Amino acid sequence: MSAALVLLLAGTFALAAAAKLRDPAAFAGTVGMVVGPTATRIVVRTLPPLEAALAVVLVAGVAPRVAAVASAVLLLAFIVALTAVERAVRATDPDDEPLVPCNCFGAGGDGDASGGRIRNLLLVAAAVAIVVEPGRAPLDLGTQELAGAATVALGAACAWPLAVALWRERPGGRGVVGGVAR
């Protein structure tokens, strides 16, 4: 199970890094809501390589507990940042309940800040599980074990957007109109 969690975390960080590198403007727009231009430039330039490096370290199994703790700390920082972004947006129009973009995986690809916080809390739980029981590194697994761990990780990754979509479509949910969350 820990290999699946490692692959889930590593895949999440790798995907987020690639999306931010592909579309830095969307990410910069989100970061710029809560920090100044200089800090925004620093975060936009340093965070994607940090996420990519963390993904590699997780998969390689180098100091798995340290990598898991670093993952949890980074994810908790993201939760704080998403809360700050949401507050900044709501402060501009307190009567409205806008869908605050996360842009953690590029523009329009990952829902709102509240969903991002929940996702990140679940990923923190995965990181804590790795700290408790790191298991073997994915690169040290046999083919069948690795395939099983990858299947579980991909299933978990696919379950998240499905859960978000179902939550939005519930009675009283925000739903989606014309491909745009409302």
Image (cartoon, grey):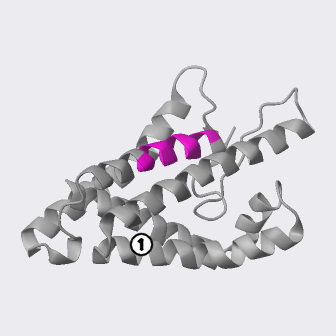
- Magenta part mainly helix, strand or loop? helix
> Which residue is painted at 22% across and 71% down in the image?
138
User: Would residue 97 be found to the left or right of residue 170 on screen?
Assistant: right
- How many marks on residues? 1
* The one of 157 and 74 positioned closer to us in this rendering: 74
Say whether residue 178 is visible: no
* 57 relative to 74, above or below: below
Q: Position of residue 154 (x, y in %)?
A: 30, 58
Task: Classify the position of the C terminus by image quarter.
Answer: top right
* 51 relative to 125, above or below: below
Q: Give the range drawn in magenta.
A: 114-124
User: Would residue 78 be found to the left or right of residue 58 on screen?
Assistant: right
Mark 1 element type:
helix
User: Would residue 87 be found to the left or right of residue 171 on screen?
Assistant: right
> Which residue is painted at 31% across and 76% down in the image?
62
> Which residue is painted at 40% across and 66% down in the image?
67
Based on the displayed image, in which of its 4 quarters is residue 143 positioned? Answer: bottom left
